[in-house]
Every structure is written in structure tokens, then in C-alpha cells.
């Protein structure tokens, strides 16, 4: 079977007529728990998955940035000196946005050499598994290496987020790039999105005989439009009505007061974030004290909160979650920004095929398009491959 790394290097050589000087990769992520908490400066617990984006890069002697990928026909090129969010569009805004963002963080774009980049990926696009953060993280690591920028991984995550916010135009938080850059095998990244301090948490799924099943509904979502920004605005409104800088400063004990101060919709948005932060802390504590079989109820409660309070689920995600739960999953929830994408279920290995078959049956019964179901494992974050 051909290796995606070899394919990426070979296609680079065919396209650009010389061999790449290096190969870098970064993974997509699953968020185990802690949804829409990152931009509220709360807690998240994502892990990097065994689906990766590969970047082959060669330096040029001029100041031109040229990018090509397996998911677009045409290469895009632009002088580094002309990089700006306004000058970028389409898929190339991800890799070129990162080059621009590195400039914003101090790289001297007038002095560094140009580059050719070719990108391939096996992170599913549109599934809520952060295919975009995988591109950003791989490119950020590659450019910081060849430009000898000496940026730490927390800074590279911020660079990826800046590209996503300004060049792509999606008002997302810091979680996805952090997971992609800081992930470790068999572990989750427990990130405090205010201090940006992180801790690697052993998941122990394998030892407990558990697997994580992805249920990709195929319902398309995008964070640069509509719902995501609206939820973010509601959270900001809630925080300002409570007189705090962010919802991180609100606890479960403040909820009765919050209910008095705001309309019902804003209150429910706030309640989701506040209770979700607590569920992340409880999940970390349960993993450490009792292991992964103890976190099912927290995953289930997180889904209900997203469905009823934050209102970011869709019928396909609810059906996938409920079917997994009623067929023996330890816990299940939608993952990522919502409005489509994927749900996850934590399942005992021996129940895996039963859950998959049940999901196929339930979707057929509801005349919904078959979801793609597959297992992922917690994997290493971004690395230089060669
Ligand atoms: C998307 C965003 F990119 C993240 O920053 C995060 O807000 C997530 O949705 C919801 O938890 O993946």
C-alpha cells in the first residue's frame, strides 16, 4: 500500500521539478469534551487523531510563496511581501494565512526565503475533525522550522488561530490548533484557554478495552458562517450582562443570578458554557481517579446541553448519539463546533460492530443518508517526518 508521505513527496517533485527539503505532518482532532468553551477562556479536553495532513516544502531563492494541494486543481502563488488577509481566498487562505500570521508574530517576511508547498491529507473534510487546523499546524511547524523562528508550540497554535480568524474569516478559538500541535499518543490535551497552560492526560482507552467511534453524519457545516458567530456573540452578551470579562469567571453558583439578568436564550447559552467547563474538570478528575469507563455520563450530559441549551446539534447527530447510547456505548456526544459534522461514542471493543450496524439501521429507518463510522486513536501531534 502506498504511504501518504511518499505520495506527498513524489507529487511535490512532479509538480515543482525538484525534491522537497522536508516533510511535516499534523493531525486532526477529536474533542472529548469541552465544546464552545475555548473562546470563553474555559477548559477543553481534545486529542489528536490518527488522521494527518502532510506538508512537503522546498525553499525558493525569491520571495514567492507557492502552494498546491490534492484538494485543489491550481497552484496559488503570491509574493510574501503582498500577503494580507484581503489578498487570500479559497483553500489557499489556510497555508498562506499561516505565512502571513507568522509575519504578524514577528517573522520578517521581507528577509525570509520564499517556498513551494504541496499538501495532502487523510483528515476527513467537513466532519468537524479539524482538517483546517491540521493544515495550519503542519504549515506553521514547517515554516517555523525552515525560517528558524524558534517559536514554541503554544505560539504556533496562536499563529494557526490568527490565520483561521483573519485569513479564513472563522471566529474560532484556540482548541483545534492546540490539539494538533500538543497532542500525544494515547492522551488528551487538557488546556486552560485563559492561561494557555496545558497538561497531557492519559486516556487509557486501550487498557480499558475501549475504542472511540466517529459517526460522521455527512451534514456539512462551516464556522465562517452563521451559527458559530451567533453563539459566540450570545456568550459575550451573557458575560457583559454579568459584568465579567468572560464566561470563565462564571460558576454554576452564579446561574440563578444569570437567569434574572438575561433573556431565556442567552441564559441557556451561558448555562451550557458554565456547566460544560465543570464537566471538563469532572472528566479529567474521573479519568485520573477511575479511568475512562467512568466518563460516560459526562459525555452524555454534554450532548444534552449542546442539544437543548446551546442548540448546535442537528437531528442526524442526535440520532447517532442516541443509537450508540441505546446499543451499549459507555457515552456519546457530538464533537466540534456543531450544526453538522460528527459525533463520537466511547464503546467497548466487543460492542463496536453492534453499534455500527445499529447506526446504519437507524439512519435507514429515518431515511437519512448513511453516516460514515470509523474508529480513531489518540495520536502524536505535529512532527517533522523527514
Ligand atoms: C470549532 C472551533 F474551531 C473551536 O475553536 C471550538 O470553538 C469548537 O468549534 C467548539 O468547541 O472546532
Image: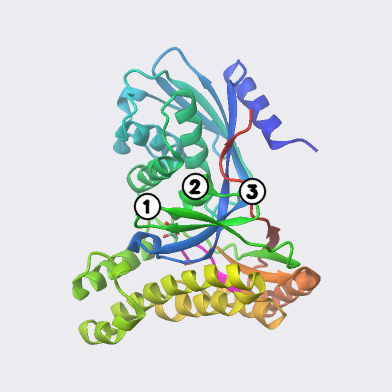
Does dot 2 land on a helix, a strand or a loop? helix
In the image, is 117 to the left or to the right of 367? left
Q: Dot 3: what SS? A: strand
| Residue appearing at x 66%, y 66% in the figure | 371
Horizontal and vertical percent position of residue 370: 68, 67
Q: Residue 328: image x %, image y %?
A: 72, 79
Q: Nearer the viewer, residue 282 or 256?
A: 282
Residue for badge 2: 132
Q: Around disc 2, counting alpha carbons within 10 Å, would you say few (fewer than 14), some (14 to 19), or many (20 or more)?
A: many
Between marks 2 and 3, how big is the CA–CA gap?
12 Å
Query: Is residue 271 depicted above or below 136 in this figure?
Result: below
- The numbered disc on residue 170 is 1
The residue carrying mark 2 has its beta carbon less than 8 Å from ligand 1: yes
Alpha carbon distance from label 1 to label 3: 22 Å
Q: Would you identify the image quadrant in which residue 375 lies?
A: bottom right
Label 3: how many residues lie within 10 Å, few (<14), some (14-19) or many (20+)? many
Question: In what quadrant does ligand 1 lie?
Answer: bottom left
Task: Mark 1 vs mark 3: give the one in front.
Answer: 3
Q: Are marks 2 and 1 in contact (CB under 8 Å)?
A: yes
Q: Please state if 256 lies on the left or on the right of 315 as rendered.
A: left
Q: Residue at x 77, y 35 (%)?
A: 2
Amino acid at each position: 500500500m502506498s504511504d501518504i508521505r511518499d505520495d506527498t513527496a513524489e507529487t511535490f517533485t512532479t509538480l515543482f521539478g525538484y525534491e522537497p527539503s522536508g516533510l511535516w505532518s499534523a493531525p486532526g482532532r477529536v474533542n472529548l469534551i469541552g465544546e464552545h468553551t475555548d473562546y470563553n477562556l474555559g477548559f477543553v479536553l481534545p486529542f489528536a487523531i490518527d488522521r494527518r495532513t502532510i506538508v512537503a516544502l522546498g525553499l525558493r531563492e525569491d520571495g514567492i510563496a507557492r502552494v498546491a494541494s490534492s484538494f485543489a486543481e491550481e497552484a496559488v502563488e503570491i509574493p510574501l511581501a503582498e500577503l494580507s488577509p484581503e489578498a487570500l481566498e479559497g483553500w489557499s487562505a489556510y497555508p498562506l494565512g499561516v505565512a502571513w500570521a507568522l509575519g504578524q508574530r514577528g517573522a520578517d517576511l521581507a528577509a525570509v526565503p520564499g517556498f513551494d508547498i504541496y499538501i495532502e491529507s487523510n483528515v476527513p473534510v467537513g466532519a468537524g475533525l479539524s482538517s483546517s487546523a491540521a493544515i495550519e499546524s503542519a504549515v506553521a511547524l514547517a515554516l517555523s522550522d525552515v525560517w528558524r523562528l524558534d517559536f514554541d508550540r503554544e505560539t504556533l497554535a496562536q499563529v494557526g488561530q490568527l490565520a483561521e480568524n483573519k485569513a479564513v474569516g472563522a471566529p474560532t478559538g484556540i482548541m483545534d490548533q492546540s490539539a494538533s500541535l500538543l497532542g500525544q499518543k494515547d492522551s488528551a490535551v487538557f488546556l486552560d484557554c485563559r492561561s494557555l497552560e496545558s497538561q497531557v492526560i492519559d486516556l487509557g482507552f486501550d487498557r480499558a478495552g475501549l475504542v472511540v467511534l466517529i459517526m460522521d453524519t455527512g451534514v456539512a457545516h462551516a464556522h465562517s458562517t452563521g451559527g458559530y458567530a451567533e453563539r459566540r456573540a450570545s456568550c459575550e452578551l451573557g458575560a457583559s450582562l454579568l459584568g465579567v470579562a468572560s464566561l470563565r469567571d462564571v460558576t454554576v453558583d452564579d446561574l440563578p443570578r444569570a437567569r434574572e439578568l438575561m433573556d431565556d436564550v442567552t441564559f441557556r447559552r451561558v448555562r451550557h458554557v458554565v456547566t460544560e467547563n465543570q464537566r471538563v474538570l469532572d472528566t479529567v478528575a474521573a479519568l485520573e481517579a477511575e479511568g475512562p469507563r467512568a466518563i460516560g455520563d459526562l459525555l452524555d450530559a454534554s450532548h444534552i446541553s449542546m442539544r437543548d441549551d446551546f442548540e448546535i446539534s442537528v437531528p442526524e447527530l442526535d440520532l447517532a448519539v442516541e443509537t450508540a447510547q441505546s446499543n451499549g456505548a459507555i457515552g456519546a456526544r457530538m464533537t466540534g463546533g456543531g450544526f453538522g459534522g460528527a459525533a463520537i461514542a466511547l464503546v467497548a471493543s466487543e460492542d463496536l460492530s453492534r453499534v455500527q450496524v445499529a447506526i446504519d439501521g437507524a439512519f435507514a429507518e429515518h431515511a437519512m443518508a448513511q453516516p460514515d463510522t470509523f474508529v480513531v486513536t489518540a495520536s502524536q501531534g505535529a512532527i517533522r517526518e523527514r
